[in-house]
Image (cartoon, rainbow, N blue to C red):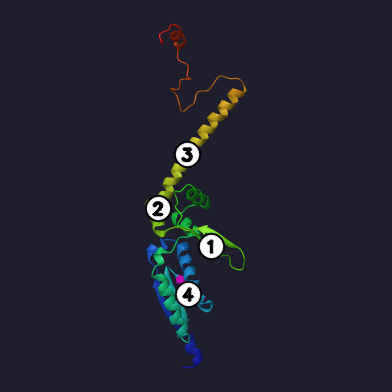
Amino acid sequence: MPKEEKNDVELLKTWTLPIGATLGSAVRTKGILLEIRARLPTATKKSLDIDAGELALAMPAGSKAEFHAASAVVAEALENIETLPVIPREIQDILSITTTERHRWLKDGRLPSAGTRTVKLRGRARKITFHVFDPRMVEHLLDRGAAEEWREEDAAAAAENRRRAAYKAKLTRSLSTGGSKIPSPSSPNDASVDLSGWEEFRRDGLLR
């Protein structure tokens, strides 16, 4: 067989990614691919690809040494792949949340950070730092539907804030126009509420 034909014959090896690693996310799956590619030599990075949740390393038959070396790197990377921290775009896809929700819940502590990671943008001198998340924590939040629960909590809090703001605005308008004091809606039994006959009761000395 001519040498050119031999080089067309591919060396191929595949690995199936566990659901515990991908968490059912195409974005997470692509992130795992990029993470493993980053550990490969520049010349062989593009030899590793992914299709339907399966990593595939393909090289010409004449690249046996490079193929075996790359296979070893991939196999080693996959040993603890389920512990690979989840990055922001991945957690947003896994939990179906927005960037705003991620920032809010990270800030108030509902979305615990597992630390930060700093990377250099390709082709640029600038580096960026972002929070990463424990994949097991993310899996737990996904299983219990935490995002929907938190949205309901946020909606209730927003409604309460609007109610309080409306009351405060009404009170401010009343005071600025010299009107009577408006009782707080949260304190219907407050002492500031007038009671019928109270003044006569006080004058008769029945409280002494």
Residue 60 shows in this picture: no
Name the amino acid, label 1: Thr
- Residue designated by label 2: 141
Q: Which mark sits nearer the N-terminus, 3 or 4?
A: 4
Residue 170 shows in this picture: yes
Task: Find residue 74 and report its horizontal and vertical position in percent.
Answer: 43, 74
In reply to whether residue 49 is colored magenta, the answer given is yes
Residue at image x 45%, y 65%? 29
- The mark found on residue 5 in the picture is none
Q: What element carries label 1?
A: strand
Q: For the magenta stretch, what is the residue range?
A: 46-50
Mark 1 vs mark 4, CA separation in Å:
24 Å
Q: In which quarter of the image is the C terminus?
A: top left
- Residue designated by label 1: 118
Q: Which of 163 and 190 is in front in this view?
A: 190
In reply to whether residue 175 is colored magenta, the answer given is no
Q: Is mark 2 on a helix, strand or loop?
A: helix
